[in-house]
Amino acid sequence: MKKIYTRTGDLGETSLIYGGRVSKNTPIIAFYGAIDESISWLGVVRAFNSDPILEAQLQQLQTQLFSAGQAALPPYPSDLFSAEEINLLEEQIDQIEKELPPLNAFILPGGNKVSAHLHLARTSIRKTERQLAGLTNPNPLLQAWLNRLSDLLFLLARKANQEEGFSSL
């Protein structure tokens, strides 16, 4: 049986999927870690969620985030994080915005458990976006997709609160 530990990272280095070893504090590894954290926060949201539509959406987003590491740097795969995927997020954002009252002030994260955890996922996505921006020659479509994803999670948090009668302020 293959063991989960390899001992190859004990001295602060890790292997890259496309070959070679780098320090665990390099920008690309920080980006991969931020993706991993974001995927995990979406998993926490799923653990508290009971809405089957939101469940399917969150699972799809987690799957897409798994692909983000492959799409971060050149050559950018043309089948990942296309303009069409960005448009799909924008359509979802526009639809949810129509269902919510206008926002006239900053809101404090919180409310119900799903909403509070969606806000944590949103801030984690923002960190992932910042890590990507720090890389040399990052994928601009992935940058835009992450930006829209954080907007979507913000609105999903507001919607989760509205559905359970919690105030968004």
Image: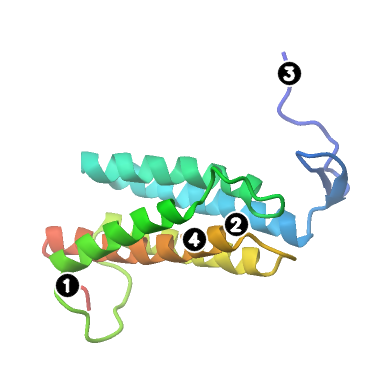
Q: Which residue is mark 3?
A: 2
Cβ–Cβ under 8 Å for marks 1 and 4: no
* Residue 45 seen in the figure: yes
Residue 50 in the image, given as x and y percentages of width and height = 22, 42
Callout 3: SS: loop
Residue name at image x 62 percent, y 59 percent = 139
Mark with earlier residue (1, 4):
4
Callout 1: SS: loop
Cβ–Cβ under 8 Å for marks 3 and 1: no
What is the C-alpha distance between the residues marked 4 and 3?
Answer: 35 Å
Q: Which residue is mark 2?
A: 34
Residue 125 in the image, given as x and y percentages of width and height = 49, 61
Q: Is residue 65 left or right of residue 118?
A: right
Callout 4: SS: helix
Residue 55 in the image, given as x and y percentages of width and height = 29, 41
What is the C-alpha distance between the residues marked 2 and 3?
Answer: 27 Å
* Near-viewer residue (126 or 6): 126
Label of residue 167 in the image: 1
Mark with earlier residue (3, 1):
3
Callout 2: SS: helix
Q: Which residue is mark 4?
A: 146
Which quarter of the figure has residue 60?
A: top left
